[in-house]
Amino acid sequence: MEVNLLQKQEELAPVINEIRNDAHALHASVNHAYDRIRPYGFHLDMVVNWIRKYIGEVCENEQDVLPIYFAAFYHDSIEDARLTYNDVMKTARLLMDEEQALLATEIVYALTNEKGRNRAERANEKYYEGIRETPYAPFVKLADRLANTSYAFSKGTADSLRMSKVYREELPGFLDALKVEGTDMRFRLPEAMVEELWEVIPPCGSENFV
């Protein structure tokens, strides 16, 4: 990561912490839990940990740092915390300029599942098309998947292993659905990040799969 991007994150630390606290409080206000036992902020923090680790490989402009962090903390706010697109935009505008707020809100919107009766319907082709068309949305979605799968494997319960198997079987198609051709780094899936996901969810037939 370039030094100026590291410096920018340090400068933005108080604002990022404010975003974190507000996002935690938002999900708590609607009694939204993670894995039915943890505050949902636990998941949001896991997602942001992956963002922090790899943001330097996708962020081409230091002005995009804040929108990326905002989107990571608010990525489930429309789907699970009863906010609308305009609600997210209003919140973002309090913390950044208009262009940044639009980018942040578009990422959140792109990561909001479609209506559906099951997992496949909620994350359909239209959903992934919206992600591929939105700068940084593939990156945040990949961080979200890493957070979910690393947590699932860490538990070792029957339910977590069941979901881990689902994630493993979905992984090749999932990565293909996020890929965007071209050289625009805002749509990049960091190679090392993808490798970490494969390590969390070994390929079919791997002796490392529990």
Image: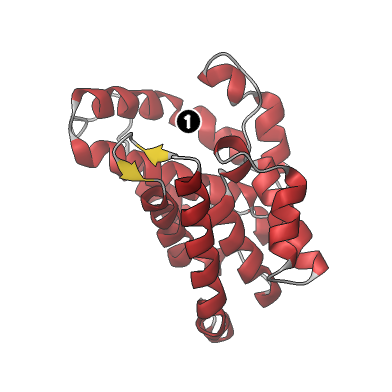
How is the rendered protein coloured? secondary structure
Q: Secondary structure at mark 1?
A: helix
Q: Is residue 104 left or right of residue 57?
A: right
Q: Which amino acid, mark 1?
A: Pro
Q: Position of residue 210 (x, y in %)?
A: 18, 29
Near-viewer residue (11 or 95): 95
Q: Is residue 181 left or right of residue 177?
A: right
The residue at the point 78 percent across, 72 percent down is 97
Q: Position of residue 58 (x, y in %)?
A: 59, 63
Near-viewer residue (121 or 23): 23
The residue at the point 75 percent across, 55 percent down is 89
Q: Position of residue 162 (x, y in %)?
A: 29, 22
The residue at the point 39 percent across, 47 percent down is 147
Q: Is residue 188 left or right of residue 196?
A: right
| 78 versus 65 height, above or below | above
| 207 versus 182 height, above or below | above
The residue at the point 60 percent across, 23 percent down is 122
Q: Position of residue 148 (x, y in %)?
A: 38, 41
Residue 183 in view in this figure:
no
Few, some or many C-alpha atoms within 10 Å of disc 1 (few <14, some 14-19, many ≥20)?
few
- Determine the residue located farthest toward the front in the rendered image: 29
Residue 191 in view in this figure:
yes
Count how many numbered circles sit on residues in the image.
1
Near-viewer residue (161 or 28): 28
Residue annotated with mark 1: 172
Residue 92: quadrant of the picture: bottom right
- Determine the residue located farthest toward the right in the rendered image: 98
